[in-house]
Image (tube, helix red, strand yellow):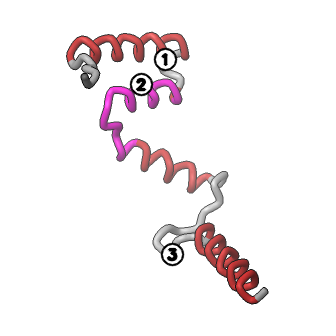
Amino acid sequence: MVILLVAALGLIVAAALAFWPSWKQPAEHPGSASARSGMSGQAEAKAPLSLEGVLVTQLIAGEISRPQYLRALEQLAARDEQRRPLSLPD
C-alpha cells in the first residue's frame, strides 16, 4: 500500500514539474498581443533549414495551396530518389 502511495505521489510531482512554466521563459497568455508578436519574431529569426521546412512555412502562411505543396513534395522526392537511390541490403 505504501509503495502505491509513493508511486502515485511521484507521478503527481513528475506531472506538475512537466507542466510547470519554465523560469527561463516569461509566462504569457498564448492569445495575448505580446505573445503573438513574440512568436512572429521568433518565427522570422528562426529560418527553416531544409526545403521541406520552407514548403511547410509557405503552406502555413498561405503562400501556396495544399495541392501546390503536395506537388512540390512529389518533385522533391523524385529528385532525391534520382540523386540518392535507395539500395536494399542483400
Q: Who's the residue at 69% across and 85% down the image?
A: 6
Q: Who's the residue at 56% across and 56% down the image?
A: 34
What span is colored magenta in the figure? Answer: 44-60
Residue situated in front as seen by the camera: 78 or 54:
78
Residue carrying label 1: 64
* Residue 31, position as x, y percentages in the image: 66, 52
Residue carrying label 2: 55
Residue situated in front as seen by the camera: 76 or 61:
76
- The reply to whether callout 1 and callout 2 are in contact (CB within 8 Å) is yes
Sequence-wise first label, 1 or 2: 2
C-alpha gap between disc 2 and disc 3? 34 Å
Mark 2 Cα-neighbour bin, 10 Å: few <14, some 14–19, many ≥20: some
Dominant secondary structure (helix, strand or loop) of the stretch shown in magenta: helix
As helix, strand or loop, the secondary structure at mark 1 comes to: loop
- Circle 2: residue type: Leu
Residue carrying label 3: 23
* Residue 66, position as x, y percentages in the image: 55, 16
Residue situated in front as seen by the camera: 89 or 65:
89
Left or right of residue 36, residue 44 in this image: left
Q: Who's the residue at 61% across and 72% down the image?
A: 20
* Residue 54, position as x, y percentages in the image: 38, 29
Sequence-wise first label, 1 or 3: 3
Q: From the image, which quarter does the C terminus lie in?
A: top left
Mark 3 Cα-neighbour bin, 10 Å: few <14, some 14–19, many ≥20: few
- Circle 1: residue type: Ile
Sequence-wise first label, 2 or 3: 3
Q: Who's the residue at 48% across and 21% down the image?
A: 63
Does residue 86 belong to the magenta stretch? no
